[in-house]
Each structure stands twice: as C-alpha cells, then as structure tokens.
Amino acid sequence: MKLELINKLFECVEFGKININSPYPPQMKGLPGADEITQEALVAGVNPDEILNRALIAAMNKVGEKFTEKKIFVPQMLLSAKAMNASMNHLKPYFADGSVKRKGVFIVGTVFGDLHDIGKNLLSMMVEGAGWEVIDLGIDVNTEAFVEKVKEYPDAVVGISALLTTTMVNIEPVIKAIKQASPATKVIVGGAPLTAAFAASIGADAYGKNPREGIIWLDLQSQKMNN
Amino acid sequence: MSDTFQYFQFAFREVGPASGEIFRFIQSTDIEDEHPAKIFVHQIREKLKYIEGISGGYLIKKNSPVSVKQGSVQIDQTELQIGRQISDYLKEASSMALFVCSAGPVFTDMINEQSQQGNIMEAYLLDAIGSLTVEKAMDHVQQVLSDEMRQRGMHISNRYSPGYCNWELQEQKKLFSLIGRNPVGVTLTDSSLMIPAKSVSGIIGIGRNLRKRAYGCKICNNSTCTYRKIIDEQNEEYK
C-alpha cells in the first residue's frame, strides 16, 4: 500500500498531475493527483522523509534527466514542478519541526541591474524539488542583500543569475563581497549569456549550464558538508 | 525627414505571435496538443485578441560621423557609447532612428498574477508571448521606417539596443533623454531597465551607403536571445 502510494506520487510528479481536477495527463483524468496522494500517504503513515526522497526528489530527478536528454521541454518541467509543489505544501510542517531534513539552504537571486526572473524561478523550483530549502531574493538584487543573507545562513550555497551580457559583469563584485564576508561560501552562477570560462574568471565556484547541472553540483556540496 | 516622433499603435490581433511561433521561441515544438501549455496558449491568445495599447515609434536625428575606434556616435550634444561592434555596423549612417516600443503593462500584470498564484508555467508562457509581441510590433515600425527611407534612396541597418551586442545598459538613460517626451510611456528604473518590462528601445542607422549587417550572435551563447531569433529569420536574406 505504502509503496503503491509512493509510486503513484512519483508518477504524478513526473507527468505533472497536480490534483484531481487537473485534466492532464489524459490517462490520469479524474484520478487523484500529487495533492491528494500526498495527503493519503501521510494519513496511511508513510514517512514524510520517504515521500520527499523516494517520490518527489526521485521524480524531479527523472524529470531533470528527461529535460537534459531533450525528451521533455520547459513547460513540461514546470508542470512537474507545480505537482511537486502541491505535494511539498503538505510536507512543510515536517520541515518546520525538523522531522524531515533538507540537503541544505540555497540562496538565489538575479544580479543587480537585471530584471529577468524566469530562469531563476525555474532553477529555484528544480532545486527545491531536489530537496533543498530555497531562499529566493528575487530580481535586481544588490550586493548587500546577498551578503546579509549569507551572514544569516553561513552554511548556505549561493546562486546568482544574469540574462544580459551587460549585466553578467555585475556578478563579479557580488562574489567578491560574499567571499570577503564568508570565505567558505560556495557560489554557483548561471544564465543564458554565461559560460564556464566566464564563471571561472569572475571567481565563481561553479557554472550551471542548466538546472540539472546545477543540482548535481549542489548535491555534491551537500555531501561534502554532511561528511 | 521628420524630426517629430512617429507613433504607431497596434492591437494584439495584428502583432501577437501565432502559437507555433511561441513554441518555436521557447524551443518546445514537440509538445502534444492536449498539454496544458498548448491549451493555455490557445486560451490566452483568444483573451488577448482585443487587447490594444501596444505602441511604438521613432524619432530621426542626424548624427556626427560614427567613430568605430571610440565605439561611439554623437547625436545632438550627447555621445552614445554604443561599442565597437555596433559602431562598425553603423559607420555609414548619417542619421539615426531612435526607437522605443512597448507591449504595455498588461503582460507584466498577467505574469505577476500567474507567478503569485504559483502558475509558473503560465507565467513563463506569458513572458515569451510578451517578448514576441513587442518584437513583432517593432518589426512593423521598422518596416515603415525602411519603406519611407527607401523612397528617399536611403538604407537602414538592423536595430540595436542597450544591453545587447556590448552596448552598456546604462546608456539607455542617454537614449531616453535624446528621445524625450513620447506617447509610448516607457520609463526607466534606476538601473536603466524599462517599465513596462516588455519594451524595447534602441537605434537604427540610416544612410545612403549603409548595408544591413548580420547580428554578431556567433560570439554570444544566448540561444534564446530575441536578436538571435531575428537573425535566424533573416538567414535566408543573407544567403
């Protein structure tokens, strides 16, 4: 019964079945979605940690793989993320009381001067789905805001994005200020015009070409921190 | 040539992108018809059909010779630091059309509304539709300019915007001060970004010997940049 619920939830997230009213995917029309199955699983005594790891993270991991392999596209990934969120809402009390642990804290924002947020939002949802607590500072985020948040969460990893060739240069002073305030803090950068070489030249610890690459690197940081 | 702002207004049904264009733009052409993304795009295009308030236009000003070495051009008393790449494309220009075009605040409002409700897929699609709409409206404006100039034996360049092709975004303030009061209603933030967000501004070179040159997209890896979309569409023209 428990395994069946986990598998059903996995499937809902993979295909973006949010709740019973969601007409998509057609073969699941009228059936419970991620929202209802999560509630059912909790009532049935499924461990919330299992729901997070074996259903949500595992499903989003598969979604990320399919996206990398170009088997699905951004809209499908976003629908999966929404289904994942519908489930995650029921897990929030367990995160709050510490009975379910997340992999770490990820502070993310679009660099100052840049108002683009779609890519950043997409990454945020995928990272949250990978089991991280995400603190989204929004768009046009100045250096001070990043540094303040890093001081508040000294073990957090920071992600900075930019979508213009003329604003990606603003990332460098932000990284310098973060490293000055907290030398051990790791920073990953991303956004359409960036490259790995550019990321290295401005002192970033990593470059995320796409959400999946970013998550793989983040999970590596989590493993290092927890060892 | 007129030195007053030439103003154009459009309805979404005139300049809004077709469904196929939207999915090509977001590189998601293989999505099945029953997917919520397809259904949403169909519904929102119907809803937007009667939306007006998409507007844009241009003001033509004479410029001093473009300095490729300095990467700049002087218009009135203002020196625009457009960078060497754009300067090279515009070196034969004797006048510049300073343009601004906007899809209006409706897209920002709808994107924010969807985001707040956690409908990130819908917000993402609206963002793409807004970007395409303003660029398509600007295509119309540019075509009018091109036709008018052709009648005078002049040629026009591609359009170039602060924030792209190494033209610093901060230069947008100078550009807007040159354009002055205009009916499009776009304003700038302290960091030189436009409000409403779905707006474009920039310059188009005009000259007798000016030749339209391809954008320098090969040196940039932004595969979803709207200028790359334009160049992809123009590829046939340059062959």
Image (cartoon, coloured by chain):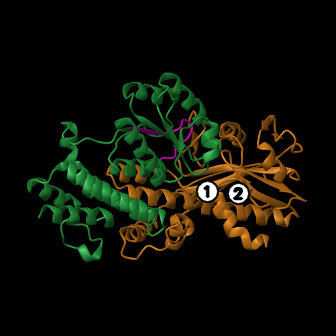
Chain colours: A green, B orange
Whether residue A214 appears in magenta in the rendering, the answer is no
Q: Quadrant of the N terminus of chain B?
A: bottom right
Q: CA distance from mark 1 to mark 2?
A: 9 Å
User: In the rendering, at what x and y percent does residue A158 appear?
Assistant: 46, 36
Of residues B133 and A198, the one drawn nearer to the viewer in this rendering: A198
Image position of B12 with respect to B199: above or below: below
Q: Which residue is rendered at x = 31% and y = 58% of the image?
A: A58
Q: Marks 1 and 2: CB-CB under 8 Å? A: yes
Q: Which residue is rendered at x = 35% and y = 58% of the image?
A: A60
Q: Which residue is rendered at x = 54% and y = 35% of the image?
A: A112
Q: Which residue is rendered at x = 35% and y = 50% of the image?
A: A130
User: In the rendering, at what x and y percent does residue A171 appear?
Assistant: 57, 36
Query: Taking the image as drawn, is residue B117 in sight?
Result: yes
**Identity, as a three-letter code, of the amino acid under mark 1:** Cys
Of residues A180 and B189, the one drawn nearer to the viewer in this rendering: A180
Label 1 SS: loop
Residue designated by label 2: B217
**Is A211 left or right of B235, judged from the image as shown?**
left
As drawn, the residue found furthest toward the front would be A227
User: In the rendering, at what x and y percent does residue B219 appear?
Assistant: 72, 54
Residue designated by label 1: B225
Whether residue A107 appears in magenta in the rendering, the answer is yes
Task: Report the magenta residues as a range.
Answer: A106-117
Query: Taking the image as drawn, is residue B61 in sight?
Result: no
